[in-house]
Image: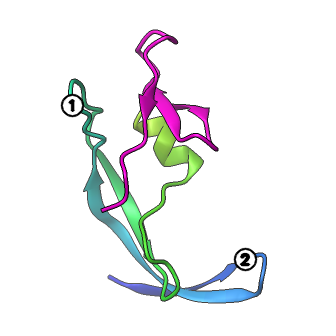
Amino acid sequence: MIYEVELDTAGSVLRAWLYPRACRVKVIASDAESREVLTDTVVSPLADEPSINDMLAEELEVAVESFGRGLWRFRWEPKEKVRPSEKRR
């Protein structure tokens, strides 16, 4: 089932489409991966790349070390194990 939803944004109200429990998501790094998570998907006519919210990051056990520099690690890894974000393709 698909639902049309209105989302409040900084600029205005955005009309988007909600697909409940539509995707299985997993973070895959060169030497480790998260567990798979079933999640809702919101499709926006304005977005040109995927994004995740804080709750999905929590479920995937992602710890952000630096938003600006794009550094992160899995929560179970030592704090010294910092990974760079992948380059956009």
Q: Residue visible at 38% across and 69% down?
A: 20
Instruction: In the rendered structure, find residue 80 and report the number of the disc placed on it.
Output: none
Q: Provide the residue designation for mark 2.
A: 9
Residue 11 shown left or right of residue 85 in the figure:
right
Question: How would you classify the magenta stretch by its main secondary structure?
Answer: loop
Foreground pick, 17 / 64: 64
Q: Give the answer, above or below, for where 2 lies relative to 58.
A: below
Foreground pick, 88 / 4: 88
Q: How many numbered marks are there?
A: 2
The N terminus, quarter of image: bottom left
Provide the residue span drawn in magenta: 63-89
Regarding mark 1 in the picture, which secondary structure is present there?
loop
Residue 75 shown left or right of residue 37 in the figure:
right
Q: Provide the residue designation for mark 1.
A: 30
First of labels 2, 1 by sequence position: 2
Regarding mark 2 in the picture, which secondary structure is present there?
loop
Callout 1 amino acid: Ser
Magenta-span inclusion, residue 81: yes
